[in-house]
Amino acid sequence: MNLILLGPPGAGKGTQSVLLEKRFDIPQISTGDMLRAAVKSSTPMGVKAKAFMDAGDLVPDEVVVGIVRERLQEPDCADGFILDGFPRTVAQADALKESLEQLSKKLDAVVSLKVDTDALVERLTGRRTCKSCGKGFHLKFDPPTADGSCSACGGELMQRDDDHEITIRRRMDTYDQQTAPLEDYYRKDELLLPVNGMGAIEEVQKDIISGIQAS
Ligand code: AMP
C-alpha cells in the first residue's frame, strides 16, 4: 500500500499516518520529522533547512526530493509507505513520480484531509511535545498534567518553533500557494481521496481506511 497524506499544517497528517503505519505495517515517512532531526543534530542539511522552517517557508525542493528518494529505497518500504508532508510542490510530485517509476512502484491513493482554517490554528497553537520522551499533547484537547509537565515521564513540554501564530499563518499561505495545487494534480491521476478531517481521530481513521479499501 503506497499512500500520500495531503493537507494543511494541523490537518492531522502525522496523527493519522502513525495509525495507518500500525494498521498496515508500513513505514510513515515524514519529511518534517526528518528535517527536524537534521536540525537537531546540526547536519549540513539541517543547518541549511533551519531558516526556511523557522520562517514557515518550504525547504528547497532538491533537499527534500533527495532525502525521500533515498528513503524509498530502504528495505522497509518494500511492502509500502505513507508519505506525510511530501510532496508539497508540483516539482516534488513530478520528482516522486519519476522515482516511483524507477522503482517500479505505484501510488494507491492520495488522502486529502479537509479541516477549517480556524480549527487548524487552534490545533497548532495548543500543540506541545515532551522534551524527554517526545509524547505529544494539546493544551485543550489532550492536556498534560496540571503543572504542565508530561503525564508519561514528567518531562518538560516544548512548543515547536514553527507553531507560533505568525509562523502558522505563513505556513498556511505557503500551503495554499504551493501545495493545494496538488489536489488537482492527483485528481487528474484519479488518486485523490478527500476525507473530512474535522471529526474525532478514530472517525477520521475509519473514513480513511474505508476510502482506501473502496478505491
Ligand atoms: P511539517 O512537520 O510537515 O509541518 O514540516 C515542518 C516544516 O518542514 C515545513 O514548514 C517546511 O519548512 C519543512 N518541510 C517539511 N516537508 C517539506 C517538503 N516536502 N518540502 C519542503 N519543505 C518541507
Image (cartoon, rainbow, N blue to C red):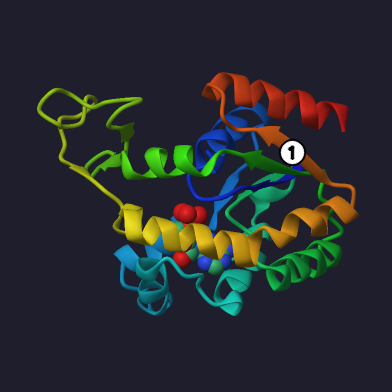
The residue carrying mark 1 is 194
Q: Residue at x 56, y 50 (%)?
A: 8
Residue 155 visible (yes or no): yes
Mark 1 neighbour density, 10 Å: few (under 14) some (14–19) many (20 or more):
some
Figure quadrant of residue 128: top left
Query: Which residue extends farthest left?
Result: 147
* As drawn, 109 above or below 102: above
For label 1, being within 8 Å of ligand 1 is answered no
> Disc 1 on helix, strand or loop?
strand
- Mark 1 belongs to which amino acid? Pro
Quarter of the image with the N terminus in it = top right
148 relative to 52 in the view: left or right: left
Residue 33 x %, y % = 45, 54
Figure quadrant of residue 101: bottom right
- Between residue 56 and residue 106, name the one nearer to us: 56
Q: Residue at x 50, y 57 (%)?
A: 172
Q: Residue at x 74, y 38 (%)?
A: 194
Quarter of the image with the C terminus in it = top right
Q: Residue at x 60, y 43 (%)?
A: 27
- Between residue 107 and residue 121, name the one nearer to us: 121
Query: Which residue extends farthest front?
Result: 118
38 relative to 174 in the view: left or right: left
97 relative to 125 in the view: left or right: right
Residue 57 x %, y % = 47, 70
Residue 195 x %, y % = 70, 34
* As drawn, 20 above or below 84: above
- Between residue 25 and residue 142, name the one nearer to us: 142
Residue 88 visible (yes or no): no
* Count of numbered tags: 1
* As drawn, 183 above or below 192: below
Residue 105 x %, y % = 83, 55
